[in-house]
Amino acid sequence: MSNRSLFLTHVAQTSPAPMALAIKSASGIYITDEQDKKYLDLISGIAVSNLGHGNKNVIAAIQKQANKHMHVMVYGEFIQSPQVSLATKLCSYLPKNLQSVYFTNSGAEAVEGALKLAKRVTGRSRVVSFTNAYHGSTHGALSIGGSEFFKNAFRPLLPECYHFNYNDGQIFDFLDGQVAAVIFEYVQAEAGNLIPDPNFLFQLAARCKEEGILLIADEIQTGMGRTGSLFALEQHDFTPDILLVGKAFGGGMPLAAFISSYDYMQALTSQPVLGHITTFGGHPVCCAAAEAALDDLIALELLASVTEKGELFKFRLKHRAIKKLNAKGLMVALHFESFEINKKIIDKCLNLGMITDWFLYAPQALRIAPPLSITTNEINQACDLLLQAIDESI
């Protein structure tokens, strides 16, 4: 059997038509397949490879830690210097109420931990999220997700999960002493990069504080510089009670976290003891990679250029077929008339040597989320290919 046949037979599939690109190597913003064809990676593994592929400092950190030790004990029992060093450095960039880090393997696991923490701290059961929200595919994360299409086949889900639209004032009447948490995204990526009114978020934070509701900021996609600051929370005049990070956080390795105050996190240590546990969360090799990635992100001063690079995409990508362009930093969404048109353009991009994608809740929109290290010349090259793909697809 061919490698493709083995892939389709033995690797569990998530769709009837996977891209099935056979990867040989990846470096910078390029991915090379087994036929040695190079592809410009315009989505960086869905906002993961912020430093580009094959960052030398990240690889060196992985190798150095792997030579010392890998897994030695479940999370939270042994003092492991990669965890301590990463958590300490991460907290140095965060507000004073976000100083205790719980490492997980994935963003969805960070969501699950945050939901448990909010219920444990408040003693309440209701959770509020938003229409078009995406927080992961595990049971609890799916329950607070904002798409009925993706949820219906897996019911019953968690009870007492409620959804409101962004910028809808009705939510303020609902937020009372029965609500444990409100979870939100600064940019609803899977809805095609929908951005809430900053004043709405400010009022939401104020209302939560009045009612003793924990505010959870899901920065799994927006974090690590994607919107032009290390965290999107820096662009707002309020601070969440719990912060979620993932995707690019691990520097290409599987790592995420939920972060809160020391006092709140203590709620997971008793009644019951081991209130939240994980075997591989905070894996030492992953933590070493994450710290190297964080160091490089700061040292290379990539954050300062993210907004300008996003503006270049907006300036270049003008076409009669583009019905709308939503963007925040290097999160760009091109909205077309239909999924059918968008899919033709995505397929044409692949033929031309460029990887793009669509959004779960906005299949008519094309995703652009390249490595933050992408250069001006590479952006212009990508835009030329995109405009060519659009012309040849419509």
Image: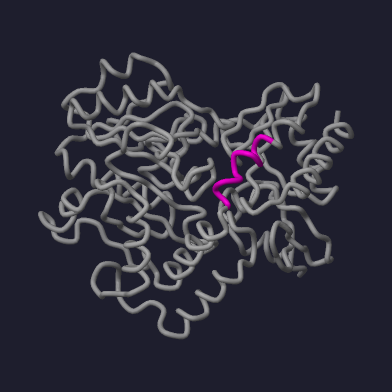
Q: Kindly report the secondary structure that dominates the magenta region of the rendered protein.
A: helix
Q: Residue at x 58, y 38 (%)?
A: 329
**Residue 224: percent from the left, percent from the top?**
49, 50
Q: Which residue appears farthest toward the right when viewing the image?
A: 392
Q: Residue at x 47, y 56 (%)?
A: 249
Q: Which residues are magenta?
A: 302-311
Q: Quadrant of the N terminus?
A: bottom right
Q: Is residue 119 above or below residue 321?
A: below
**Residue 387: percent from the left, percent from the top?**
83, 35
Q: Is residue 198 magenta?
A: no
Q: Is residue 283 above or below residue 299?
A: below
**Residue 203: percent from the left, percent from the top?**
32, 22
Q: Is residue 115 above or below residue 276?
A: above
Query: Which quadrant of the figure has residue 125?
Result: top left
**Residue 207: percent from the left, percent from the top?**
25, 23
Q: Which residue appears farthest toward the bottom when viewing the image?
A: 67
Q: Residue at x 50, y 33 (%)?
A: 188
Q: Nearer the viewer, residue 165 or 298?
A: 298
Q: Is residue 78 left or right of residue 168?
A: left
> In this figure, what is the number of numbered marks?
0
Q: Quadrant of the C terminus?
A: top right
Q: Nearer the viewer, residue 83 or 233?
A: 233
Q: Is residue 304 magenta?
A: yes
Q: Tell me, what colour scheme is on the image?
A: one colour
Q: Is residue 250 left or right of residue 244?
A: right
Q: Nearer the viewer, residue 307 or 352?
A: 307
